[in-house]
Amino acid sequence: MNKSELVNAIAAKAGISKVDAKKALEATTEAIVDALKANDKVALVGFGTFSVTERPERQGINPRTKETVTIAAKKVAKFKAGADIDAAIN
């Protein structure tokens, strides 16, 4: 499912226009991104939790030259599905 299909599904289930559904989806994703930028956790009970974790610096191998390279440390977004999602797909 891509973004436009998700907007269509939201509009149909909520009984609102596609324009309003798109605005709601964009506002939601923007709020989640803003919270993650501030290093906050976003917990949606029954759905899941978005959080930020830090990956440490590590050694990797360039597949072309077989030379070892240092991969810099970075922050990554993480999502852990909630119990309702786990139950629904299993």
Image (cartoon, rainbow, N blue to C red):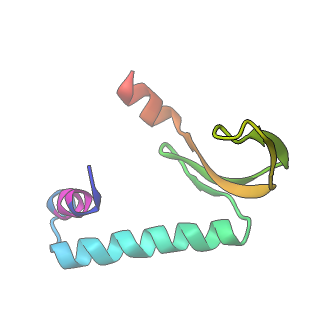
- Residue 39 in the figure: left or right of residue 6: right
Quadrant position of the C terminus in the picture: top left
Q: Position of residue 83 (x, y in %)?
A: 51, 33
Q: Position of residue 81 (x, y in %)?
A: 52, 39
Magenta residues, dominant SS class: helix
The image quadrant that residue 64 belongs to is top right
The image quadrant that residue 60 belongs to is top right
- Residue 19 in the figure: left or right of residue 82: left
* Residue for point 60% across, 74% down: 34
- Residue 59 in the figure: left or right of residue 83: right
Stretch of the chain drawn in magenta: 5-11
* Residue for point 53% across, 73% down: 31
Q: Kindly give the residue lying farthest to the front in the view shown.
A: 65
Q: Position of residue 87 (x, y in %)?
A: 42, 26
Let me know if residue 48 is in the magenta part. no
The image quadrant that residue 61 belongs to is top right
- Residue 50 in the figure: left or right of residue 85: right
